[in-house]
Amino acid sequence: MFTTETKPEQGSLRIRGYLRRSVAATALACGVALLLTPALAIAAEGDAAAPATTLATPSKISVVETPDPEQGPCLPFWLSLSVRVSSSANNFVLTVIASAPLCEPSEATAVIYSMPGNGVAWPQQLAEAQKFTISQAGTTVITFSKDCLPVQFDVVTGATPPTIRPTGPWPGPMLFPLDTATAQQYWGFPCPPPTTASTTTTSTTTTTTTVPVSVLPATTVVEPTAAVLAATQNREPPEQELAFTGSTSNLLAAAGLSLILMGSLLLLVARRPANEN
């Protein structure tokens, strides 16, 4: 058996080669990171600069619950609840009165279905829905707002399909199924055309007076005053922040390229001892 002894010089060369490769790999990684930093920052800035926007439609349903100071013992639905109905040119209002707390709370939904109009009631499309629960003694006032659009107002205790028609599907049972006055088909009226804001243009006459100014000879140099120099030196360029951002990105890119070049050279140098042995 023959054993090969490693010379001290060879071990030292291997250690130096390993250190060179480690430094080269670190330099390459840092260079790539510096090159990617400006692009990632620009992408993040672009995402932050475009917030999502949502358009809110004013609600046409209002539900106001006012509990009584004294509640007392509970009663079933048909013994506790009663309703008053009122209708005007602007609103359709149901006032639900609970004389006692309900032994089983009643969950209901105030709904508005839009109608085709012009004497046509079906099919109807769900326009708005608002859920509420009656559990305490007191009053619950449901107000539907009217405008020019033809709609149907209703308060139900079941499903609210997106489209209803006589042949089905139908919304859930009414909160007061034996009182048909608690639902209303409102036919609206012809909606007025959209108004456009009128603009008034006012013409003004400007009189310009020209004052003759003596012209200095071409060879005459006028020295600026101290106040003018101070104002000019203290004035900041309007694009200072933008220019600073661009120069920072360029510096990062240059540094990244330098580190990548240095890492590549170190890798070439680190491989030479291994090839020579």
Image (cartoon, rainbow, N blue to C red):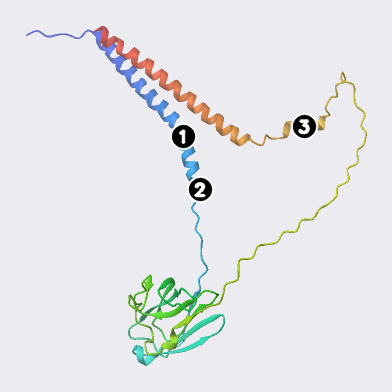
In this view, the mark in front (2 or 3): 2
Residue lying at 17% horizontally and 8% vertically, measured from the top left:
5
- Numbered mark located on residue 262 in the image: none
Label 3 sits on residue: 230
Name the quadrant of the N terminus: top left
At which x and y percent is residue 230? 77, 32
Where residue 194 appears, as percent x and y from the top left, is: 61, 66
Which residue is located at x 51 percent, y 60 percent?
Answer: 55
Is the residue marked by circle 1 packed among few (<14), some (14-19), or many (20+) residues within 10 Å? few
- Where on the picture, by quarter, is residue 104? bottom left
Question: Where does label 1 land, which residue?
Answer: 39
Provide residue 157's location: percent of width, then percent of height.
36, 79
Residue 272 lies, with reference to residue 159, above or below; the image says above
208 shown above or below 273: below
Q: Residue furthest bottom?
A: 79
Q: Separation of disc 3 and disc 1 at Cα? A: 39 Å
Which label's residue is closer to the chain start, 2 or 3?
Answer: 2
Label 3: which secondary element:
helix
Mark 2: few/some/many CA within 10 Å (<14, 14-19, 20+): few
Q: Is residue 61 visible?
A: yes
- Between circles 3 and 1, the one closer to the viewer is 1
Q: Which mark is residue 50?
A: 2
Residue type highlighted by circle 1: Ala
> The C terminus is located in which quarter?
top left
> Along the horizontal axis of the image, is 177 left or right of 227?
left
Q: Amino acid at mark 2?
A: Ala
